[in-house]
Amino acid sequence: MSVLDSIFVDMSVVLGSARVPIRQILKMGRGAMVALDCGADDPTLVYVNGELVAKGKILVEGDQMSLEISEVVQRTAN
């Protein structure tokens, strides 16, 4: 067992975003769709512990989804 096995990170893969009033969310049923603020060609953003670390695109093959990383974002100097 490696020391790295016990380290957890919070990772988010963001396809897009939307601002939706809570009353509209409460009215949504199964299968409801929410329009996102991005196009099909816009990159998917990868955040680790709240910090943008990479950009890529979602690939779908059959019932499997994966993320192809196209760019690792350079860290900005503080």
Image (cartoon, rainbow, N blue to C red):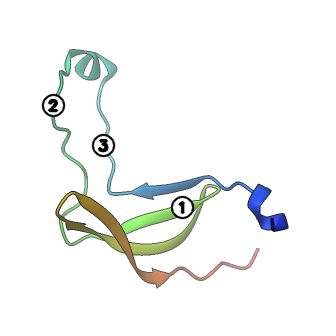
Looking at the image, residue 54 sits to the left or right of residue 76; the answer is left
Looking at the image, residue 67 sits to the left or right of residue 23; the answer is right
Amino acid at the residue labelled 3: Ala
Distance from disc 3 to disc 1, alpha carbons, whole Å, reads 17 Å
Residue position for label 2: 32
Percent position (x, y) of residue 73? 54, 79
Q: Residue at x 27, y 23 (%)?
A: 25
> Which quadrant of the figure contains the C terminus?
bottom right
Among the two numbered marks 3 and 2 on one chain, the one whose residue lies closer to the N terminus = 3
Amino acid at the residue labelled 1: Tyr
Image height of 56 relative to 26, above or below: below
Q: Which mark is residue 18?
A: 3
Is residue 68 or residue 48 the one in the foreground? Answer: 68
| Nearer mark to the viewer, of 3 and 1 | 1
Distance from disc 1 to disc 2, alpha carbons, whole Å, reads 26 Å
Is residue 73 or residue 12 the one in the foreground? Answer: 12
Residue position for label 1: 47
Percent position (x, y) of residue 4? 78, 66
Percent position (x, y) of residue 9? 67, 56
Percent position (x, y) of residue 1? 81, 65
Residue 43 image-quadrant placement: bottom left
